[in-house]
């Protein structure tokens, strides 16, 4: 069986403002290696997502040495990473420690694109005083990524408190009827807090891309005026 060709999207940054990323779950070691070889031929770089520690360990030693890998988020940077150019624009707010892998996927995606996120964790509504203490800090950010499992109540609460763009990310954290994140997803979609876009379950990468789109659109509008 011959390996299929890889039709990589080298022009995505010009169109959308961020590079194509490699979703590694379901890809073989050979496929990951071949894609990165194509990127290297062009002198490019790439963000890798959903790269499990076991899959990372199977890569060649040379390739592992060329990756900036974080096991918690399952992300890796290959090649050049954008230098930090923006800070204080995005806050990633996580309900609990169990949501950290999704939070860090968002943070690492933003970091790859030169956006340093503020990280505010363990402020779920079970102890809502913890969140209320941090609301002044959160309010300073024009974009907030809210990450929560169980009933995803944090997303609705922030949607009713924060003036900036709140992007909700339901996670698969929870018992029984939480149903691997479906309850959190439905609750976030049904929120009475207006104007809160909701990502798919555990999609920290998608939330970061939405934040990048919003910030870069605002930058273009400022420059045009």
Image (cartoon, helix red, strand yellow):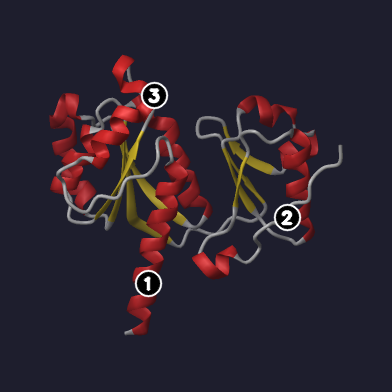
For residue 89, above or below residue 148: below
Residue 130, numbered circle? none
Q: Position of residue 67 (x, y in %)?
A: 67, 42
Which is more N-terminal, label 1 or label 2?
Answer: 2
Which residue bears the numbered disc 3? 180
Which quarter of the picture shows residue 153?
top left
Residue 219 is tagged as 1
| First along the sequence among labels 2 and 3 | 2
Q: CA distance from mark 1 to mark 3?
A: 37 Å
Q: Residues within 10 Å of mark 3 (few under 14, many from 20)?
A: some
Q: Which callout, 1 or 3, points to the residue nearer the camera?
A: 3
Return the x and y of residue 18 as percentages of the image width and height. Answer: 53, 60
User: Where is residue 129, by image quadrant?
Assistant: top left
Mark 1 closeness class: few <14, some 14–19, many ≥20 residues within 10 Å: few
Q: Which residue is mark 2?
A: 39
Q: Position of residue 93 (x, y in %)?
A: 30, 40
Q: Rounded to the nearest whole Å, what is the CA distance between mark 2 and mark 1?
A: 28 Å
Disc 2 to disc 3: CB gap under 8 Å:
no
Q: Nearer the viewer, residue 149 or 224?
A: 149
Q: Are marks 1 and 3 in contact (CB under 8 Å)?
A: no
Query: Which type of secondary structure does the marked residue at label 1 adopt?
Result: helix
2 vs 3, front mark: 3
User: Residue at coordinates 36% horizontally, 83% vertically from top-left?
Assistant: 224
- Residue in the picture at 72% in, 41% down: 32
Residue at 18%, 35% in the rendered image: 131
Quadrant including the N terminus: top right
Q: Which residue extends farthest top?
A: 176
| Residue found 30% across the figure and 18% down from its top | 177
Residue 134: name its quadrant: top left
């Amino acid at each position: 069986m011959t390996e299929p060709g890889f039709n990589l999207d080298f022009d995505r940054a010009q169109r959308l403002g961020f590079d194509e990323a490699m979703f590694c779950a379901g890809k073989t070691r050979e496929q990951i290696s071949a894609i990165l070889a194509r990127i290297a031929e062009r002198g490019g770089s790439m963000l890798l997502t959903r790269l499990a520690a076991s899959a990372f360990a199977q890569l060649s030693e040379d390739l592992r040495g060329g990756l900036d890998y974080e096991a918690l988020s399952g992300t890796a940077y290959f090649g050049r990473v954008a230098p930090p150019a923006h800070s204080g624009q995005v806050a990633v707010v996580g309900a609990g420690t169990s949501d950290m892998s999704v939070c860090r996927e968002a943070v690492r995606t933003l970091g790859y694109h030169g956006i340093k996120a503020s990280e505010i964790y363990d402020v779920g509504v079970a102890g809502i005083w913890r969140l209320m203490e941090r609301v002044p800090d959160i309010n300073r950010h024009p974009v907030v990524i809210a990450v929560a499992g169980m009933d995803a109540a944090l997303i609705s609460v922030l949607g009713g408190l924060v003036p900036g763009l709140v992007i909700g990310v339901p996670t698969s954290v929870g018992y029984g009827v939480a149903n691997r994140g479906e309850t959190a997803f439905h609750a976030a979609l049904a929120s009475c807090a207006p104007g809160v876009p909701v990502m798919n379950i555990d999609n920290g990468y998608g939330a970061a891309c939405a934040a990048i789109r919003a910030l870069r659109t605002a930058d273009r509008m400022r420059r045009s005026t």
